[in-house]
Amino acid sequence: MKELKYLFAVGLLIAFNSCREDTFEQQVTPAQTGDEITFGSALTDIQTRTIYGDEPVNGAYPVYWEEDGSDQIAIYCPQAAQGKLVKYSVKPDKENPEHSSTVTKINEDEAGLQWGQEETHKFYGFYPASAVTGTEDGKIVGEIPTVQTPIDWVETTNEAGGTTYTGVANTDYAFMWAYGTHNKSDGGDVVLTFHPWVTILDIEINGPAKDGETIKMSSVQVRSLNDEILNGKFICDMNPVEQDPTKAPTYTGIGNTASTRNQISIELYDTDKSDFITLGKNDKIVVRAYLLPKDENYDTGTGGDQQLQIRVAPFNSAVLTRTLNGTEGSVSGGIVAHKINRVILPSVSKTGPNYWMSSLDPDIFVTELSLPGSKMSYQIQGQASGVTYQDLFIADQFTNGIRAFQIQTASTNNHGCFDTGSAEDQILYMTVAGEKTGTRFKDIVEEIATGLKTGESAGKNNEYAFILLTAALGKCDSYGTRIGGTYVDGNQAWMDAIRNELAEMTADANDTYRIYTGEITPTTTIKDVAGHIIIKVNYNTDDMGNHLSTTDEIPAMFAQWGVVDDVSTEFTETSAYAVNTLRWGTSNHSVTSNLKWFYHEATSVGYNDNGGEETYSTKVANIKDMWDKSVAYYENNDDHSMWFLNDLGGCYVNGIYDSGESQNGVEGWTQFVGPYATDLLQKRTEDATLGIVLMNYANPDNQYTGNLIQTIINNNFNFQLRTSSASTANYNASYTKGGNAIGWDN
């Protein structure tokens, strides 16, 4: 049923038809044990209704079997002689496509279901066959995904003169079931009547109310505010139907119980246009969400046992929420299981800054999040004399949703004389294009901390930031005397400067810098670090790492860049692609947790596979491979102990570009990697964090990286990020405000 025929061609998507009884007259020829069982099929009709729109919709919309026989059903019969679960192909009757003309085995070379010895056989049918992964304890096992990406977008002109963008739903999620019994002695075809099983929300998102205003849209989610299971693997139990034909099958959620199962997510991204959909006044987006059914009403108002919330995310903007209640519509009680429920949302609006973290569950583990980040964050157009990597100042980057920053610095001997001074005299200054500036590192930290405070004043209390601190090697001051004294080279002095700079910031009594001072572990959550800045230090040599004391308690994580075999891996490590152990407090003491740093970091990209820290082919392969490994790690581990950093930033070198860093090299690489990574992630369906993702020109308005930033942010809402054992009920309850017909909750 991937291509659907409509009774009413007015831009409305799939549905199911009204009620009727169907009988098949067959000449009775008793079947014998071992004979192959033959089938006929039909589709039942149900009514849809509008609950949250301006007026109810009472029409019925039929669904037909596909003409080409591509519809496939799975039939399970525990009494069958062999092959208890067999998949069949359905072809429709030309006169009445709600009925089948033939139901045949998909694989003609294999045996179908055969009559067993018992007189009465029970038959359990399920559509689509692809959703059935097997049986367990005599019950069908299937799965409904979290991310339900439309298979296509169709544009039509609506009654108001605007454009309606309809996301053509993948009807493989439109599960249907059938149950029936047949006596062997009765002979003839076994007739199975299929009924809709999932609960469907038909969601209409309306464009902005103002003339001339346009708003780019990002995604929409359906969330259960009391953690009802809406997606994932399930066991479908037909027992309620066997006991009472008026009932529907029930289900039990199985699989990864540590993941979030209370959300359905739909990306509003048109892959044919490689862009998110933009709405103007009178424009609409219509999408369909398929939910695991609950046989009591989903949403029964503020006193009910199930609250559903629609969350709409405009591009680079605050999330809009609408909590559904049961006070609207022609029938009280809200969302109805097994039926299509139409939800019409108010006009969208865009507000900033982009405090997207505060729309997440604060009990999510920090290592589970996907953070958009800026490469060479301070190397900004307008203030750098050399090659620049960014076109927004750091404060503006934060306002636009960037939460990770790569900061390059150099130490300065504050004693004032060459070959003098001590460890206590070293401080950190920012560098641009390898040259030291007059800006202290702590001044940049203060900019980010100010962004956190501004968010808190707006009630956004779950924001935090991450800084990757690197050294401009060769630009750091040394201290001490070479003759008859102690001499410390510049690279070692940089480690002293980090200790001094962070100590100065954490000692500030005015809460200026917001440095996180607790240890980061695999179980650290958003709630633990909210309102603070996490520091991670990249040092480059053993001499740098061993320079710190084993007893230092510096509020930062440390790992040596370019070290291979620090952690055993199943892949070939390079200086730019490896797994290291993270140490807290100093680079020179034993590990206190099992937190690991899986990084891909390379700045110069050899154009046409010619030189660079990584050649073009290697860098592109490592970008994809890291995300593939994050999926594999997520599926096989639940200890949250791997923190990923994927560096998409950099600069083409050699070939048609300069041998070293150049502005056209930065721009050339950005123009390739932004769309490449966006397309890669938009096609991904597996659960997993993307980790920290660094990029050039981390600006939502950039034509190459803007969509990538939003795609990374959306990953936090689209996938099953795991949470601590603490209940999320209080968090969810804070969003249950009882929506109204004319506006958003927030």
Image (spheres, rainbow, N blue to C red):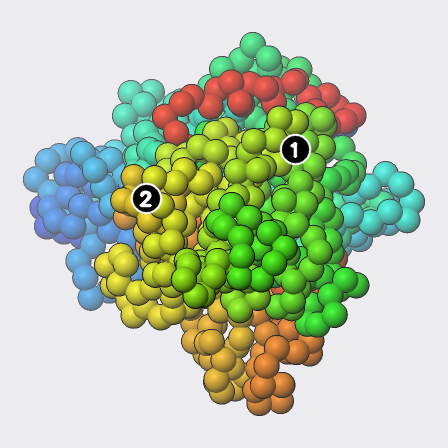
For the residue pair 79 and 221, the one nearer the viewer reads as 221
Left or right of residue 249: residue 320? right
Q: CA distance from mark 2 to mark 1?
A: 28 Å
Residue corresponding to mark 1? 512
Which residue appears at 46% of the width and 76% of the height?
A: 614
- Where disc 1 sits, the SS reads loop
The numbered mark at residue 262 is none
Residue 409: x, y in percent?
58, 57
> Seen from this angle, which residue lies furthest front?
484
For the residue pair 193 and 348, the one nearer the viewer reads as 348
Which residue appears at 69% of the width and 68% of the height?
A: 388
Sequence-first tag of 2 and 1: 1
Residue 121 appearing in the image: no
Residue type for callout 2: Thr
For the residue pair 404 and 50, the one nearer the viewer reads as 404
Residue 150: x, y in percent?
57, 53
Residue type for callout 1: Thr
Residue 453: x, y in percent?
68, 31
Residue corresponding to mark 2? 550
> Seen from this angle, which residue lies furthest top?
303
The total number of labels drawn is 2
Which residue appears at 78% of the width and 48% of the height?
A: 215
